[in-house]
Structure formats: structure tokens, C-alpha cells
Image: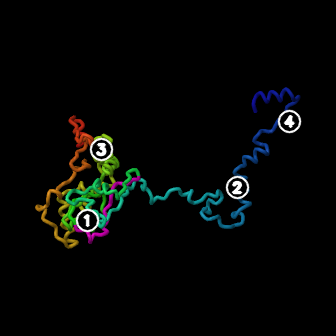
């Protein structure tokens, strides 16, 4: 009770007792109805509803927590087997049938290396790095129809049958990782060059992808070349085809990118001027060390 209000009562009353003092606000009936107690709520709930009639609670409500009417989906807000799904990488599928059809329609030149910019220039694949999409995945649909030797760089391979279909024709397959910044430059190279930014250096794979891209069975770009040759021979014996002589390989199948390089023929740190059709290269040793480290 405020001091001024208490002094006012002292002035008006001759004798102050517990009977003539006003009741506190918390004890009034109006306040109690507006702010019911927990015990009263439980008592009201026990007198009404399915609990008082010994019936089962509504569907989705745990019988143990039926007093509070809390659905089970709220009691268990997360499911452990979806842990880390927000960090999972997605890859758009591309089949061997589609790849062979693009070659037959001359939308892809098999006499040049085929990588992500070449496939994106067909306008058949829309990769969105902000949606955790990290490139394309080669699937083995149409493996018996594929018949063109190519130098293919892909981000993921679904099965070893797809690898065997490429190598059976005398081709070379490499799985390669690109970080989101490099992907944004590869998806639309012309738009990237028009921004006037230097070519970024490719980042290393994350921890959960290092094992895949260093595995010679998956033809990872970080794997040992000698181990890759052994796996090529093992896969040829498994599927019953003969590999061509490596000494007779043309220069097309020997072209490979540096782990930090994202474009063929263009190094990280270079600036491409489309208007003047020139390439600007950094001369400072600090920049050269950064882009090639």
C-alpha cells in the first residue's frame, strides 16, 4: 500500500483496525478470476474432459502429459536422425543418356574438356549455391548407350558403373569439389567476368568430403595418380573391357586443373576484361602467393 494512501486513511478514521483496512488487490474476487491459480486450473481440468471420465486423451497428446494438453510433437521438437541435414550437399543428376544426347546434338564438343561451365552453358541445369547445391551428379542411366571418349569433370558419381561406362570408351573421369564462391563464378562465367572481379581460388573440400575426393575409386582430384591407374585396371577387369594404351592418349585426356584452379587456361587472381578482350595478371608477390597457396 502506498504511503500517501495509508496516511489518508489515518486522517479519515478515528481508530485503525484490521476490519476497517481495505482488502489488498490480490485478494479480491475480480483479480482471482482474471488470474487463476495453477491448483485451481488443475482442479477444473480434473472435473471436466476425458481425464475425469477415464477416457483416452485426444490423438497426438501423451497420456503422461495429458494434464497440460501438450501434443507429443512439441514434447519432442527434433528428430536425431535428421542431425546435420542443414549441412548436407545436394547435386543435380545428369545421366549418361543425357550426356550422349547433348554430344549427338552438338551442344557439347567432345574434343574439348567437359566441365561445369560447359554443362551449364547448355541451359539445362540450374544450380543454386544458396540452396546447398554443389554441382552435378553423374548417374548410370544409359550406360549401355554411351559411346564417346571424353574428358569429363563432375562433382559426384553415383556408382562405379557410370565410371566404367566413361572409361570403357577410352575417356577420363575426375570428380571435383567447388566451394559456393567458385560455383557462382562457374555457373555464369560471362556474368562473373562482367563484374570485374578477379578469378577466385578454389577452397579445399570440407572435412566430411575429404575422404571422397581423395579416394581413387571415386576418381577424386586429390587422389594419388598411381592409385587411380590401378583402380582403372581393376574396374576394367571387373566389367570385362580393355583399357587403351596410356601412351597413345591425346593431349585432351592429359588436361587437368590445379586444385586451386576453376577455369581451364585461367589462373586464380587473373582479371578478365571482356570489353577490351584482355587478361590482367597480378604482379605483386603477395597476391601471387595468396592465389597459389
Q: State the separation of the CA atoms marked 3 and 4.
A: 88 Å
Q: Is residue 141 magenta?
A: yes
Q: State the separation of the CA atoms marked 2 and 3.
A: 68 Å
Question: Would you place residue 182 above or below residue 170 in this image?
Answer: above
* Residue 95 location (% of width, % of height): 31, 65
Q: State the separation of the CA atoms marked 4 and 1.
A: 102 Å
Q: Earlier in the sequence, mark 2 or mark 3?
A: 2
* Residue 113 location (% of width, % of height): 22, 56
The residue depicted at 25 percent of the width and 49 percent of the height is 263
Q: Is residue 202 left or right of residue 248?
A: right
Q: Which residues are magenta?
A: 131-147
What residue sits right under mark 2 in the picture?
42
Q: In the drawing, what numbered circle is on residue 20?
A: 4
Q: In the drawing, what numbered circle is on residue 193?
A: 3
What residue sits right under mark 1 in the picture?
104
The residue depicted at 87 percent of the width and 29 percent of the height is 13
Comparing marks 1 and 3, which lies closer to the viewer? 1
Amino acid at each position: 500500500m502506498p504511503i500517501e494512501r495509508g496516511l489518508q486513511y489515518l486522517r479519515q478514521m478515528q481508530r485503525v483496525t484490521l476490519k476497517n483496512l481495505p482488502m489488498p488487490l490480490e485478494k479480491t474476487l475480480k483479480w482471482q478470476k482474471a488470474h487463476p491459480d495453477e491448483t485451481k486450473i488443475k482442479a477444473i481440468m480434473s472435473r471436466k474432459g476425458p481425464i475425469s471420465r477415464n477416457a483416452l486423451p485426444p490423438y497426438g497428446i501423451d497420456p503422461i502429459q495429458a494434464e497440460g494438453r501438450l501434443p507429443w510433437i512439441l514434447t519432442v521438437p527434433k528428430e536425431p536422425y535428421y542431425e546435420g541435414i542443414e549441412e548436407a550437399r545436394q547435386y543435380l543428376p545428369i545421366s549418361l543418356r543425357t550426356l550422349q544426347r547433348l554430344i549427338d546434338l552438338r551442344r557439347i564438343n567432345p574434343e574439348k574438356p567437359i566441365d561445369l561451365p560447359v554443362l551449364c552453358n547448355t541451359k539445362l541445369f540450374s544450380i543454386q549455391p544458396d540452396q546447398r547445391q554443389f554441382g552435378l551428379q553423374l548417374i548410370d542411366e544409359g550406360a549401355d548407350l554411351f559411346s564417346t571418349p571424353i574428358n569429363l569433370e563432375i562433382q559426384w558419381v553415383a556408382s562405379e558403373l557410370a565410371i566404367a561406362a566413361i572409361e570403357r570408351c577410352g575417356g577420363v573421369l575426375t570428380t571435383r569439389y567447388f566451394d559456393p564462391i567458385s560455383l557462382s563464378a562457374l555457373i555464369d562465367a560471362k556474368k562473373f567476368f562482367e563484374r570485374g572481379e578477379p578469378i577466385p581460388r578454389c577452397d579445399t573440400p570440407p572435412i566430411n568430403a575429404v575422404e571422397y575426393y581423395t579416394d581413387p575409386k571415386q576418381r577424386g582430384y586429390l587422389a594419388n595418380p598411381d592409385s587411380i591407374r590401378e583402380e582403372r585396371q581393376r574396374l576394367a577387369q571387373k566389367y570385362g573391357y580393355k583399357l587403351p594404351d596410356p601412351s597413345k592418349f591425346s593431349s585432351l585426356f592429359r588436361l587437368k586443373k590445379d586444385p586451386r584452379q576453376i577455369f581451364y587456361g585461367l589462373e586464380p587472381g587473373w582479371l578478365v576484361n571482356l570489353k577490351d578482350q584482355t587478361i590482367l595478371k597480378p604482379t605483386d608477390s603477395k597476391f601471387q602467393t595468396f592465389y597459389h597457396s
